[in-house]
Amino acid sequence: MATSRQIPALRAKLNLAPLGGVVLVISMVVLSWPPPPRLPRTWDESKPWRYVAQIDRDGNLWAEKTKLGPVDRSTLQRLDAHVHAAWSTPDYRPNEIYVKGHARLSYAQVQPVVEYLHRTMKVPVIDLALVKGDD
């Protein structure tokens, strides 16, 4: 029977050269990625073609600068008429609406407007923003 002194001990050596190459390639790829785009934090006045629907702190719905009243079914239908009339002019880009809600409102107060725009009017692009202050 062979003893441990007769059989040389197996010593595995880890080859780190491929690992170093992989790490180097991955770090080069990650460092070469462009930075993510910065999203605007405030309303961009340079885009006047966006239709704006706003809900003030009292819960009143505004279509551009026209006060429609508290958010209910009839007010949303009047908003629909205002939006489609605006979209028929060359001043606005169709199928995009910017919804601004006062910062003191809860999402539950803004949700009926967004839901109506999405489900009933089938608006594909709805941007949301908060308005701070007394706007």
Image (cartoon, rainbow, N blue to C red):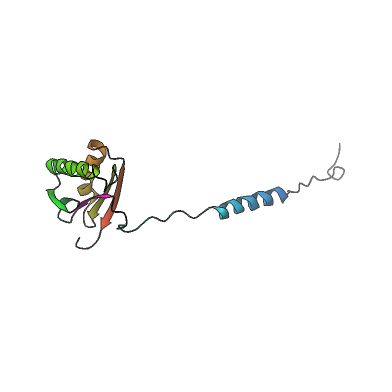
* Towards the viewer: 40 or 27: 40
Of all residues, the one furthest to the front in this rendering is 90
Name the one closer to the observer, 87 or 128: 87
- Residue 1 horizontal/vertical position (percent): 86, 36
How many marks the image carries: the answer is 0
User: Taking the image as drawn, is residue 59 in sight?
Assistant: no
Residue 10 location, x and y as percent?
A: 79, 45
Q: Which residues are magenta?
A: 47-58
**What residue do we see at 54% from left, 52% from top?**
33
| Spot occupied by residue 18 in the image (x, y as percentages of width and height) | 70, 48
Nearer to us in this view, 118 or 84: 84
Residue with the most extreme bottom position: 133
User: Does 6 sit left or right of 74 as displayed?
Assistant: right
Q: Is 44 placed left or right of 105 in the picture?
A: right
The part of the image, by quadrant, that contains residue 102 is bottom left
Q: Quadrant of residue 47?
A: bottom left
Left or right of residue 39, residue 66 in this image: left
Quadrant where the C terminus sits is bottom left
Note whether residue 80 is visible.
yes
Q: Residue at x 81, y 46 (%)?
A: 9
What residue is shown at x 28% (from left), y 40% (from top)? 123
Q: Position of residue 36 (x, y in %)?
A: 46, 53
Q: Is residue 55 magenta?
A: yes
Whether 68 is among the magenta residues is no
In the displayed structure, 59 sits above or below 124; it is: below
Residue at 26% x, 39% y is 118
